Amino acid sequence: MKNKIQIILACVLVVAVVLACGQFSSQSASPASPSAVTAVIVPEQSVESGAEAGSSGLGDSLYPGFGNGGYDVASYALDITVDDISTSRLTAMTTIEAVATQDLLGFNLDFVGFEISSLTVNDEPADFSRKGQELTITPLKPLLKDQSFTVVIQYQGSPEKMQSLSMPVQAGWVTVNGGSFVLSEPDGSASFYPVNDHPLDKAKYTFRVTVPNPLEVAANGVLIETIDNGDTSTFVFEVRDPMASYLATINIDEFDIETMTSENGVPIRNYYSSELPKEVREPFARQGEMIDYFSEIYGQYPFEVYGSMVMNAVFESALENQTLSIYGIDAIDFEDVAETEFIVAHELSHQWFGDSISVADWGDIWLNEGFATYSEGLWIEHLDGREALDDWVKSQYADVVENSYPAPGNPSADDLFNGGVYVWGGLTLHALRLEVGDETFFEILPAYFERYKNGNATTADFIAVAEEVSGKDLTEFFDNWLYGETIPPIPALGLGN
Ligand code: ARG
Ligand code: ZN
């Protein structure tokens, strides 16, 4: 079990994404600088009383510069033509439909690199300036509160390599020899589209991606159309359920595509880089069963489709992109299918916890990783019974103790995906189960999901549901389990005392 955790967490230790089939040319990683605040220069005649510039951050406790205030995005349409796959040279246009949430003289987007050739707001050219990852836009006319507006940004160039602030790993659009993939949690999205980059501003997405033949595209959502343009093909995907920006993914390669349907009717499409051996499919064979099982205990699978993408590249991680989890080849243990299946179950369960219910603040990341880790335990229990779960709990507990993982409730900004949010976070749910009893516990999870699906939640929101459903004051319980110096004991299993 530890191996798997290490695979999921290995990125913490890795200085850069290492590629299976090539190395990056020497690079100067350009760290995102979300704290940059750019003053908006306001033309005198357009000042309206009360109108202000939208803020250049959304007040996240760990990353105050992520996202922007003053508006709410309804949809993004990304129209991307890959001119050259070896460099990922793109010609792109992003169309954003948004609503002002206050009178606005200007507003910000997060965007890194590229040359912007045109930028309009409501079809009129707008002024803009750039500093770090802040793109500050001043429309010709101020926007009024509740006004809908359209931003169209045309840009070209190759995505810049972005180092995540959350750990020493490349995030965003990654170019590999012969293909590319996108893995953005938490801050890589600005590497390929202008975005309000915080999970609080979910939106719908359309991707129109044109690639040279015979390359193919695997993106989030439903493949609506494939257009043959002769030398190139255009793949159109739609995400019709709201999605957090970090979950947007576009992957380009030649793929073997496998389709199936869960017994309850959820369509599954898996994309395997066509260079990979057939055995790569084995750990993904039970995704249908997993979807149906998690639907039973958490609530109906929240999206139109699911599937996985495996790239022929080492990226020290897997990521639960909405409707399409992605895996580096190193996440697949060809010797141990069962072990890999736990990672598959982990990413799949994130569709409920992480993707449908997203964190309102990155400091609450245990609501993603603790829940996904405990989902592995629940999958084990589903397959092999309670004793197997208890053994799993014991090994998880030993992992926390041996590695002195920190408590899950207060991750540090530069070590967001630490072992504590995963393993201790998962154990917190098991401890809650022991505290309130099985019946209540399995009422809490679907009640929480029902209330916050397609939206965002905080730790306080989860605690409130747990208290409401159980009728217990759980303040002290959660204080100890989420913020304690050392992990509390689990007497029922003889752990920690
Ligand atoms: N959420 C991922 C998981 O399932 C970890 C993502 C880490 N981020 C990254 N850019 N590699 O554990
Ligand atoms: Zn996870």
Image: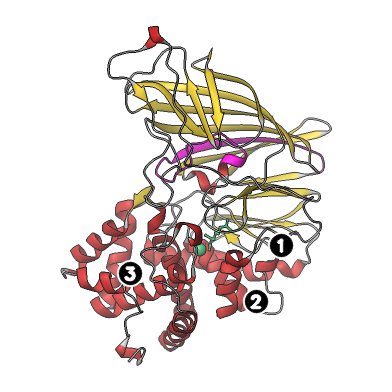
Place of residue 73 in the rendered image (x, y in percent of width and height, measured from the top left) = 44, 33
Element class at badge 1: loop
Q: Earlier in the sequence, mark 3 or mark 2?
A: 2
149 displayed left or right of 158: left
189 displayed left or right of 179: left
In this figure, which residue is indicated by the disc labeled 3? 482
Instruction: Evaluate whether residue 263 shows in this view.
Output: no
Residue 193 among those drawn in magenta: yes
Q: Which colour assignment does the render follow?
A: secondary structure
Q: Which mark is residue 337?
A: 2
Residues tagged 3 and 1 counted as in contact (Cβ below 8 A): no
Place of residue 174 in the rendered image (x, y in percent of width and height, measured from the top left) = 69, 49
* Residue in the picture at 50% in, 63% down: 417
Q: Is mark 3 within 8 Å of ligand 2?
A: no
In this figure, which residue is indicated by the disc labeled 1? 314
In this view, the residue in front, 414 or 363, is 414
Place of residue 287 in the rendered image (x, y in percent of width and height, measured from the top left) = 56, 65
Q: Residue furthest top?
A: 45
Crowding around mark 2 (Cα neighbors within 10 Å: few <14, some 14 to 19, many 20+) is some
Q: Amino acid at mark 2?
A: Val
Q: Earlier in the sequence, mark 3 or mark 1?
A: 1
* Residue in the picture at 37% in, 63% down: 410
Q: Quadrant of the C terminus?
A: bottom left
Element class at badge 2: helix
Foreground: disc 3 or disc 2? 3
